[in-house]
Image (cartoon, helix red, strand yellow):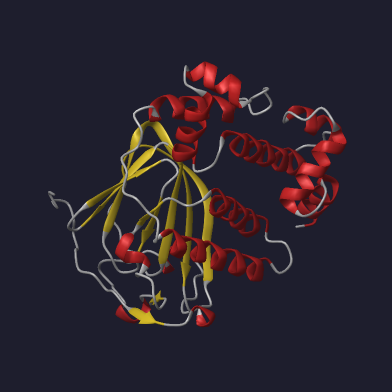
Amino acid sequence: MDNSGFSYAMTYRKQRLAPIEQWSPNIHYAQHQKLPTGRLDQRMIYDFELLYVRKGEAITHFQNDSIVIPAGHLLFIPAGVSHCNEVRSTPNAHFIGIHFDFFHELQILRDEDLIVNEHKIMDSKFATEAIAEGFEPFSAQRLYIPSPTCVQLIEQLVQEFTMRPPAYLLTCKALLLQILGLLLRSQKSYNHMNPPIQSDRILEIMDHIELYPAKHWNNRKLATELNMNEDHMIKVFKKIAGMPPGEYVQMLRHREARRLLRETDDSIEEIGRQVGYTDIHYFSRIFRKSEGIPPRAYRNLSRIL
């Protein structure tokens, strides 16, 4: 790989073998991002990042290699390692980025506390990577395929961090511990498989679902539109999206319902219809199952905060 343009390539790696019960992660940043095609600036971070690609494709360039991140995959970016992210899909890619440390070592007040200034590198600030006995370090594998349950936890963590309800930091810590635990488990079964040849078609239909989540999507309709056997379609969709079609549709509907509850004065019944649920009682039940509180309580809480 050509490393031209990389102004600093040193690594500052600290690791510690520690029982999982001693881990006390602190979340510094958790957010959805949509980035256009192209290469971002090279950087190094003081903490760790989980970079999940929801849609599209990216590649991260390290000093000695590059890792392609298809949709439905997650990259662990270590502290103190120079890297450069690049969006390969057109016109953009959707990410979820979570920055954290394992032992509550860092106090992050602004972006400058996360990103290393190459002209003023503070060695003591680099966070320590925790290693669990019996498992490889997260940085040894780097690329993961999170389970649907893990993806839901990631989405929930971003929601908590964005909305910041009472005790959100404690909830975020609990969610991140679950995410890290599931990623450790996945080390045992991970398979470096190439993305399926139908990935472009799946990504197109994912875009369409995101634009029109209220449409009547079901496995038969998707299989017909993709000209695929239904069972095969479900298998390929899950590999690309990280979850089955039904869960993907429900996740997008729930995300849109949260937005409408926060940003509009539409009635609960009208919001349910807008996201694809004609029965208000069913909508309320589904929303409460995902969020833990009914739609009206969510709206009231979001406006207090």
Side of 75 where 5 appears, left or right: left
In the rendered image, which quarter is residue 178 located in?
Answer: bottom right
Asked whether the viewer can see residue 267, the reply is no
Side of 23 where 195 appears, left or right: left
Q: Which residue is depicted at the point 77% across and 37% down?
A: 264
Q: Nearer the viewer, residue 7 or 88?
A: 88
Side of 277 where 75 appears, left or right: left
Q: Nearer the viewer, residue 127 or 188?
A: 188
Image quadrant holding the C terminus, namely bottom right
Q: Nearer the viewer, residue 107 or 57?
A: 57
Asked whether the viewer can see residue 220, the reply is yes
Q: How far from the left and from the top, in percent, is residue 73?
A: 41, 47
- Residue 45's place in the image compared with 24, above or below, is above
Q: How far from the left and from the top, in percent, is residue 238?
A: 49, 38
Q: How far from the left and from the top, in percent, is residue 247?
A: 62, 39
Q: Nearer the viewer, residue 25 or 178?
A: 178
